[in-house]
Image (cartoon, rainbow, N blue to C red):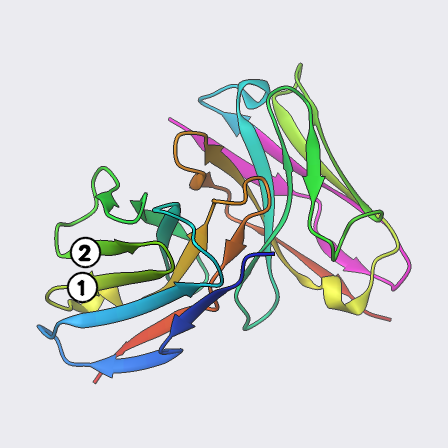
């Protein structure tokens, strides 16, 4: 099984701050990595696919990078509506998909 | 407009069975990879099962042998039959479509809560 390790598990930042979340895979997954946003009580929403491609309609302040085992998700300027939990997800081992543990983002 | 609507959740005793349904609109279930993902209270996301367009099915080790994914093409509906339920199966269950090009879940239902407790 491919394990996905996200860090930090939570963070607190001010509006306008740059926020960075990392995701590490237990083995090389090339760029087979997606990122999701989940707001409380809601279903997750796909933000980024293939490590760095922005899903249609997603604001450009969200971005992703990385390949192999190390990946980064960035919010360039944190907005109040970005308060959520963010998850990475690998699909290198499709159909056996795994998520990272999540990063809860709060406003300071 | 694409929509997924789950039903069938509820309170069930350990060892019991439950069937979840996910009615789809705006696309054809049988032409897509469809999946169930669950989230225990206050926890992260866990992939549960997938059914490919060709009919192949796959399961997470935690549910293999107890859960069965299926679909009814005439109703454009996905199902999850859950047997021998355990307390650790308590979660919100989401159905989701997988976009084949990148293995991501591009559409999700609103979720249905399954509580396994005596």
Using the image, name the chain to which the residue with label 2 belongs: A
Q: Given the current orientation, which residue lies at the most extreme right position?
A: B15
Question: Of the numbered discs in the image, which one, if any, rests on residue A75?
Answer: 1
Could you confirm whether marks 1 and 2 are on the same chain? yes
Can residue A82 be seen by looking at this rendering? yes
Q: Which residue is mark 2?
A: A62
- x and y percent of residue B109 in the render? 51, 43
**Which residues fall within the magenta stretch?**
B1-23
Q: Is residue A77 above or below residue B54?
A: below
Screen quadrant of the N terminus of chain B:
top left
Magenta span: predominant SS is strand
User: Nearer the N terminus, badge 1 or badge 2?
Assistant: 2
In contact (CB < 8 Å): disc 1 and disc 2:
yes
Q: Is residue A84 left or right of residue B5?
A: left
- x and y percent of residue A99 in the render? 49, 58
Q: Is residue A1 left or right of residue A5?
A: right
- x and y percent of residue A8 in the render? 35, 78
| Residue B20 lies in the magenta-colored region | yes
Using the image, name the chain to which the residue with label 1 belongs: A
Q: Tag 2's secondary structure?
A: strand
- Mark 2 closeness class: few <14, some 14–19, many ≥20 residues within 10 Å: many
């Amino acid at each position: 099984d491919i394990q996905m390790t996200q860090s930090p598990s939570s963070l607190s930042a001010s509006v306008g701050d740059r926020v960075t979340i990392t995701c590490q895979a237990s083995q090389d997954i090339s760029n087979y990595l997606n990122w999701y946003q989940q707001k409380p009580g809601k279903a997750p929403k796909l933000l980024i696919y293939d490590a760095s491609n922005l899903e249609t309609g997603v604001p450009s302040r969200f971005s992703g990078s990385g390949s192999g085992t190390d990946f980064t998700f960035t919010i360039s300027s944190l907005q109040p509506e970005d308060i959520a939990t963010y998850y990475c997800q690998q699909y290198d081992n499709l159909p056996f998909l795994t998520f990272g543990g999540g990063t809860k983002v709060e406003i300071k | 407009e694409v929509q997924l609507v789950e039903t069938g959740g509820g309170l069930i005793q350990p060892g019991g069975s439950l069937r979840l349904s996910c009615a789809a609109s705006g696309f054809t279930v049988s032409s897509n990879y469809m999946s169930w993902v669950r989230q225990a209270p206050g926890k992260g996301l866990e992939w549960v099962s997938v059914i490919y367009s060709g009919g192949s099915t796959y399961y997470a080790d935690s549910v293999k042998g107890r859960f069965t994914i299926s679909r009814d093409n005439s109703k454009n509906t996905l199902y999850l039959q859950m047997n021998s339920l355990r307390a650790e199966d308590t979660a919100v269950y989401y159905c989701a479509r997988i976009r084949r090009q990148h293995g991501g879940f591009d559409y999700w239902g609103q979720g249905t809560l399954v509580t396994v407790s005596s």
